[in-house]
Image (spheres, rainbow, N blue to C red):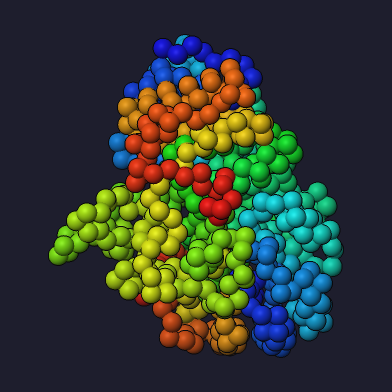
């Protein structure tokens, strides 16, 4: 079982990003995904900065993957995407079908991110012929369905050719919109957002009127309020065919989650929870994503 | 009965949740109708809705006898154990002689292409193609003949995309407004376990509960409070992205108001952009609704075809559509940049 650090979904100041990845370089993560996946206006770091971090991490022995924007609408966004797909130093995580098209054209291997709708082995087999090496399950996919998909991959002799990665820790990326909800919460138009996401390094909490935490607003992205944490079930994940556990950076301390997971894997025991935040695991058990199900283990 | 459409015009694609709606759409000027089977193979998997093999055959015959097209939506994502049902839906669509399948899943598109190469494929909005490279992928791999575009692009972006697209585009013109990129929204499954991609539903009816709490009427979805109404408020269905929530101490429609999309006012712009078809949302609505909406849009498209320069959205059309809309209000949604 490998551990990955997913792309940073929030907008952090430049120095905080460099600090975080300096620490990530000496963390137990095997794979690090880098780049802006949520909003093309977030430019604290440019493509060259990300490449510099990528090279540092690669020198530290990490497998580095460059993650692309999820919702690609503007020509300028396609331009950035094209440059990312043109480089051949690092593998790319495609988060939009347009990225798959560009990577396949160039004969480049790629990872299909969680926003690519892979719900069956036939879809994966098709992408595999176009260069797919690893897929990150759509966050809503239950563990039982994963077992069936991996079994189908196996039957097609593709089990070794395609790795499976699961979103194991962090607020779940649930939806993407044309509208910027952070700007809306600040009563600002999207085109004059004043980069308010910088003020919200963990997004903005959205609660029901009775105070129950529901979602997290992160620019055009809507995330879960609860942190999905499958660390205590990682052995069941492995059993279902998961090869890589993704830890999504929530705070700089999320690297402690990586440390604990790595230790739990070495010692072959369930990982402990390292924080007191609201947690959920419903999706994995085939239930509503927001739920925490303590009985499921297999 | 409206006359059959002229070639080259923008096609009016209307929803058919059942046979009476399909007939109402055809009788009131739809150029094409779209429908699904009565299960989770399509994105409007609602109780009491949709077609069995017999009504589907009658619906297709009704449309074809009047020179209209019938599209079959098989636009959810099949998982391994239930894959055979999706495959059979594709085969049945081919047998029915539908004019196109509306599909989203890579694997299913590949199957349809191999098994029924003569059958036209339209990329469903659930396929979430918002740029020309994504459209090229679907066109090169599966030979799609048309793509339905998510409601996330501005009118200007639609124009640019239409100019670069390898296939004709269909855009949403009227109906319930999805504010998230379709096919990439898991909000419903996060709260209820059922999602558009897997179950063909958003904010499913089984999860809705109305509760009187003192003077307040509360709308809950799987126990989660979506909105709370006073005696003078107009309550609406608790679609989870259209509730009032608390953000930073303020209670408001943090994601979107209960409102419907209406693009009558920018129809000339969409025509200019080269959009091939306008899709009307609402397979879950009544035959009377479908009839009324189809009638207004038929008049609008005919006026535009007759007099592209003199077109203006008539106030009686706007009133008629507003009366049928969520919260009695309409918006241009993402087509209008300031909405974003």
Closest to the observer: A21 or B219? B219
The quarter of the picture where residue B216 lies is: bottom left
Closest to the observer: B162 or B310? B310
Q: Is residue B332 depicted above or below A259 in this figure?
A: above
Q: Is residue A52 visible?
A: yes
The quarter of the picture where residue B54 lies is: top left
Where residue A270 appears, as percent x and y from the top left, is: 49, 82
Where residue B231 appears, as percent x and y from the top left, is: 19, 56
Where residue A16 appears, as percent x and y from the top left, is: 67, 84
Which residue lies at the image location 32% right of the left edge and 31% below the top edge? Answer: B286
Quarter containing the N terminus of chain B? top left
Q: Is residue B127 depicted above or below B214 in this figure?
A: above
Quarter containing the C terminus of chain B? bottom right
Closest to the observer: B117 or B81? B117
Closest to the observer: B3 or B192? B3
Q: Is residue B57 visible?
A: no
Which residue lies at the image location 59% right of the left edge and 20% below the top edge? Answer: B307
Tell which residue pokes out farthest to the left in this image: B214
Where residue A224 appears, as percent x and y from the top left, is: 46, 68
The count of marks equals 0
């Amino acid at each position: 079982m490998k551990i990955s650090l997913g792309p940073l979904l929030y907008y952090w100041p430049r120095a905080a990003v460099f600090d975080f990845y300096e620490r990530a370089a000496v963390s137990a993560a095997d794979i690090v995904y880098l780049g802006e996946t949520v909003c093309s206006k977030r430019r604290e770091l440019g493509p060259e900065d990300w490449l510099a971090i990528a090279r540092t991490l690669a020198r530290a022995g990490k497998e580095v993957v460059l993650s692309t924007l999820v919702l690609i609408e503007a020509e300028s966004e396609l331009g950035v995407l094209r440059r990312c797909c043109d480089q051949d130093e690092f593998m790319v995580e495609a988060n939009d079908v347009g990225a798959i098209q560009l990577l396949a054209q160039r004969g480049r291997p790629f990872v299909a991110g969680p926003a690519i709708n892979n719900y069956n082995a036939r879809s994966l087999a098709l992408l595999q012929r176009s260069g797919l090496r690893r897929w990150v399950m759509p966050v809503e996919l239950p563990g039982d369905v994963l077992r069936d998909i991996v079994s189908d991959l196996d039957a097609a002799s593709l089990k070794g050719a395609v790795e499976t990665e699961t979103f194991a820790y962090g607020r779940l990326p649930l939806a993407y919109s044309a509208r910027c909800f952070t700007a809306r919460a600040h009563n600002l138009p999207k085109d004059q957002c004043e980069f308010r996401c910088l003020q919200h390094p963990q997004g903005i909490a959205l609660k029901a009127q009775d105070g129950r935490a529901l979602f997290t607003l992160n620019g055009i992205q809507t995330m879960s309020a609860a942190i999905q944490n499958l660390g205590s079930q990682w052995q069941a994940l492995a059993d279902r065919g998961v090869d890589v556990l993704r830890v999504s950076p929530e705070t700089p301390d999320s690297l402690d989650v990586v440390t604990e997971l790595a230790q739990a894997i070495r010692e072959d025991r369930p990982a402990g929870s390292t924080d007191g935040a609201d947690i959920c695991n419903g999706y994995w058990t085939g239930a509503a994503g927001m739920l925490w199900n303590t009985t499921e283990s297999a | 009965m409206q006359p059959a459409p002229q070639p080259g015009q923008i096609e009016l694609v209307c929803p058919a949740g059942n046979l009476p709606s399909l007939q109402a759409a055809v009788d009131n000027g739809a150029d094409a109708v779209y429908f699904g089977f009565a299960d989770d193979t399509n994105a409007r998997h609602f109780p009491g809705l949709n077609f069995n093999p017999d009504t589907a055959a009658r619906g297709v015959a009704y449309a074809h006898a009047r020179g209209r097209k019938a599209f079959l939506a098989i636009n959810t994502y099949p998982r391994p154990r239930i894959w055979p049902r999706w495959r059979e839906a594709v085969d049945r669509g081919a047998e029915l002689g539908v004019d196109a399948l509306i599909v989203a899943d890579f694997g299913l598109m590949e199957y349809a292409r191999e098994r029924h190469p003569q059958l036209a494929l339209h990329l469903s909005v659930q396929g979430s193609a918002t740029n020309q490279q994504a459209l090229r992928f679907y066109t090169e791999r599966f030979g799609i003949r048309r793509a339905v575009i998510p409601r996330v692009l501005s009118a200007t972006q639609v124009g640019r995309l239409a100019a670069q697209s390898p296939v004709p585009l269909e855009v949403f013109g009227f109906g319930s407004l999805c504010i998230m990129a379709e096919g990439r929204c898991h909000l419903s499954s996060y709260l209820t376990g059922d999602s558009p991609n897997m179950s063909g539903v958003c904010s499913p009816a089984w999860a809705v509960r109305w509760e009187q709490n003192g003077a307040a009427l509360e709308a809950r979805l799987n126990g989660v409070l979506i909105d709370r109404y006073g005696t003078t408020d107009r309550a609406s269905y608790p679609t989870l992205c259209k509730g009032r929530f608390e953000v930073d101490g303020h209670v408001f429609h943090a994601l979107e108001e209960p409102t419907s999309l209406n693009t009558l006012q920018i129809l000339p712009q969409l025509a200019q952009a080269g959009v091939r078809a306008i899709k009307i949302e609402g397979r879950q609505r009544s035959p009377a609704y479908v009839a009324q909406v189809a009638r207004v849009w038929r008049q609008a498209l005919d006026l535009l075809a007759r007099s592209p320069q003199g077109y203006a959205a008539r106030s009686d059309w706007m009133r008629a559509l507003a009366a049928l809309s969520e919260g009695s209000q309409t918006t241009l949604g993402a087509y209008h940049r300031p909405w974003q």
